Image (spheres, helix red, strand yellow):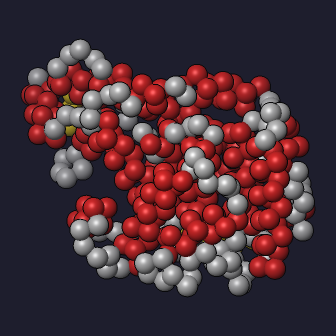
Amino acid sequence: MKMFDLKGTVLAMSTPSVISLLNYIEMYKGKTFAADKMKKVEQLREIARHSHVLASNAIGSVYADESRLEAIFKKEEQAETLQEHMIRGYDSALDLIDEVYKFQPFDRSFISTLHYYIYKDYNPEFGGRFKDSQNYIQEVKGDNIRTIFVSAAPEEVLPLLENLIYQFNQCAMDEECNKLILIAAFMLDFMCIHPYNHGNGRVSRLVLDFLLKKFGYDIDNYFAIAYLMRQHLDEYIDAFEASSKGWSDNENNYAPFVTFILKRILEAYRKLDYIMEINNMDVDTDEKVYKIVVDSATPIGKGVVTNILYATSQATIEKALAKLLRDGRIQLITKGRYSKYFRT
């Protein structure tokens, strides 16, 4: 059975490349204080929340009809399908985290409560219960299913999880242990244990949100890390696969997965910094939209532009895009509902 040494793992990860990532994250950390003073910041927070919920569920192959999303998030109507219940339950779990993270101890009971919240309005008896049969972490591409990792056996879940949480909390009080490395390492171990029959990936991302906020990294309130994890899904899977090899025999290398998580945290801070830069520019909307399109390395959709210019109306952004096209300053790459634009 796996034997944890979280402190040893964290200390061993203090390599130049990891330290560089940590230093950059610390440099950007204060950006969220400035973001709170931005115009219509609640709209930015709502965009971040919705993208977090949808991306984390999509990674777990949970989707809902786009036409139903507004009603689901605003709770104006009853959830109808399993997928809608999962999305609404995940959103409720984030509400819980925001309500309690400052004082809630990190323990097995709270992790199971997060799992329970996902399922509570659809199958409450299923939520929060540990698995009763062996499960597997698999990658599905079309008709092809590939097993990436065989998780801990059901009888191993309780002792492994209890020991992992105990070591996490001990390390969290140790000044030698970097909290961000610790969180990422915990996330990997949690996924390898895979304590529930379903929903383990979603719970791991809820735990990530909770622990980051608990230790003062509230970037998820302004730009969703889960969204970036989905954007880099192949890399996410590759990093997990690389770091889980040899896990049961205590021979795995945490570096690929920890590095991946740190990169996404840093990327989220940099995305927020860019949003703040664009919105604080003393120019008209046309020039802001133009800069966004020109800065993008790939063709960019109107939805992305709208999310960056979160305080500007969609109609104003559409007018700016149309004018930039007429003036030949940008080009239309694909037409239709999901039109994309690129620099000329």
Quadrant of the rendering where the N terminus is positioned: bottom right
Q: Residue furthest top?
A: 282
Residue 273 at x, y percent in the picture: 43, 26
Q: Residue furthest front?
A: 103
Q: Picture quarter containing residue 34? A: top left
Give above or below for 170 relative to 294: below
Write the residue at 57% across / 46% down.
Answer: 102
Residue 61 at x, y percent in the picture: 47, 68
Residue 94 at x, y percent in the picture: 47, 57
Q: Is residue 241 left or right of residue 26?
A: right
Q: How many marks?
A: 0
Write the residue at 73% across / 27% down.
Answer: 19
Write the residue at 88% across / 51% down.
Answer: 5
Quadrant of the rendering where the C terminus is positioned: top left
Q: Picture quarter containing residue 216? A: top right
Q: Is residue 231 left or right of residue 77?
A: right
Residue 128 at x, y percent in the picture: 61, 75
Write the residue at 21% across / 20% down.
Answer: 287
Q: Is residue 99 left or right of residue 186?
A: left
Q: Nearer the viewer, residue 237 or 214?
A: 214
Q: Nearer the viewer, residue 62 or 88?
A: 88
Q: Picture quarter containing residue 221? A: top left
Residue 235 seen from this side: no
Residue 243 seen from this side: yes
Give above or below for 19 relative to 174: above
Q: Is residue 132 left or right of residue 344?
A: right
